[in-house]
Image: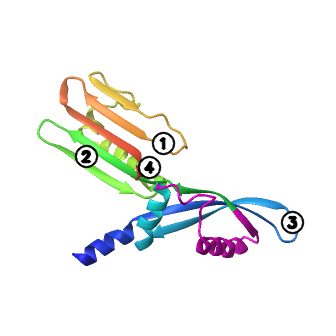
Amino acid sequence: MENATQKNKSLDLITLEFICKGYYPKTQEEATYTIELSVAGDYLEYFQELLEKNELNASHYNYTITIALRELSWFRNIVFKEVTAINAKKSYKYLVMLEWSTEDDSGLDYYLYHDYKAAKDKYKRLIKDENDADISWIGSEVFDENGEVNKGYHFKCSEKTNKEQNLCWEVSDLNDSNRFSIITLTKVEIL
């Protein structure tokens, strides 16, 4: 049991963003930059507690963090001066779901992704499968040869965009409320 708890602890992670000020050594030009540090394991609870108590901020950070930021700044060829802000970077996962129902069966399939592009690819593949007459009733009944919705069916879909957004594709049978297919892609913040 202890190994499973330790394993789950190592999967928990927060990323801290340190907004720093410094300058370029050759030109002396000032620079504002961000360094991200991932915190996991035993340090996770400690840093979360500091954040909750507002003790991890630009006026309260410790000597060890200062040394780490100074060293990491050198990799960017910047001389570190100070931290101006510390934030917990929000983390997201992407949930793709297919909820479906027919006269004789129903189901909910879901897929969780770290990457929006991978989630969107799965979302598109599920739509393609639903439009396949060999796989789903939708492919053989709902759309005509021009892609128009046949009478007796309802269809709605999110507008196409390149932005990272929630998406929805929905088909339902207006004559039978038990026949529908809903595919969604939802951006979920990890708390």
The magenta segment: 53-82
Q: Residues within 10 Å of mark 3 (few under 14, many from 20)?
A: few
Say whether residue 67 is magenta. yes
- Kindly report the distance in space between the C-alpha atoms of the residues bearing marks 4 and 1: 10 Å
Secondary structure beneath label 4: helix
Query: Closer to the observer: label 2 or label 1?
Result: 1
- Kindly report the distance in space between the C-alpha atoms of the residues bearing marks 3 and 1: 41 Å
Q: Residues within 10 Å of mark 4 (few under 14, many from 20)?
A: many
Query: Closer to the observer: label 2 or label 3?
Result: 3
Sequence order check: which comes first, mark 2 or mark 1?
A: 2
Identify residue for label 1.
165
Identify residue for label 2.
134
Identify residue for label 3.
28
- Kindly report the distance in space between the C-alpha atoms of the residues bearing marks 4 and 2: 23 Å
Residue 120's tag is 4
Q: Position of residue 25 (x, y in %)?
A: 83, 71
